[in-house]
Image (spheres, rainbow, N blue to C red):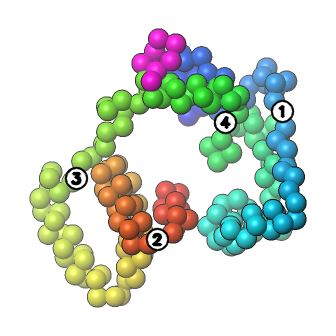
Amino acid sequence: MFQRIYDERVRTPYGLGLYLGLPEAEEGRFLPIRWWTATPEQEAAFWSDLPGPHGLLGVGYRLNGTPPLAQAAFANTRAVRAGGPASAGGVGSARGLAGLYAAAVWGLNGRPPLLTPDTTASRLPNPATLVPELKDIGVALYRATGNGTVPRTTIGLAQPRAGQIVGSTYLTVLHTGNLREAGANEESITAVAS
């Protein structure tokens, strides 16, 4: 369904060569993704800066499997290209990707930008302004969990997710910023979205 909506509302009207699910007719234009070539030193430096195979990113990329998932081989299969899963991204040219960014910000081919104040506005502003009693509930919850029974990091990670669940960009951005200021690592913050 998402592919159809993207195709009808974005790709076709803006004339983009960027697909979520590569049509078979376009298959001849596809060039396989190549595994990188690096010196042993470069490869060691790359892997030393990544979380382990059992961390959130490692699990997400199936680096914890036996054998680990070969990312390039996975993306090179017709089934993945045709399916267009969000986790593997779209298929297109550099011009197609640049066109999507241009369409998003400035508009393209005489069409308006995809992103406007209306399309990027929070679906729910600060809910405390709509339901003042939420402040009292929040204070009570803080008192109940602020005694250390629930680790502060757990509470901190739950807060952006709560903002996502209620569709509040305001709360999601607010609490994500609080997490960064508190020193939470990017892997933990990113994992909240999934």
Q: Quadrant of residue 133?
A: bottom left
Chain-order first, disc 3 or disc 1: 1
Amino acid found under the numbered disc labelled 1: Leu
Which residue lies most toward the top here?
110
Q: Residue at x 44, y 72 (%)?
A: 183
Q: Which residue is mark 2?
A: 184
Whether residues under marks 2 and 4 lie with C-beta atoms below 8 angstroms apart, the answer is no
Can you give x and y, in whole percent of width and height, for residue 102 in the image? 52, 26
Magenta segment: 106-112
Residue closest to the eye, 112 or 62: 112
Amino acid found under the numbered disc labelled 3: Asn
Amino acid found under the numbered disc labelled 2: Ala
Q: Which mark is residue 90?
A: 4
Q: Which residue is mark 3?
A: 126
Can you give x and y, in whole percent of width and height, for residue 48 in the image? 73, 71
Q: Residue at x 81, y 63 (%)?
A: 43
Dot 3 surroundings within 10 Å: few (below 14), some, or many (20 or more)? some
Alpha carbons under labels 2 and 4: distance apart: 30 Å
Alpha carbons under labels 2 and 1: distance apart: 39 Å
> Secondary structure beneath disc 4?
loop
Left or right of 84? Residue 117 is: left
Dot 4 surroundings within 10 Å: few (below 14), some, or many (20 or more)? some
Alpha carbons under labels 3 and 4: distance apart: 34 Å
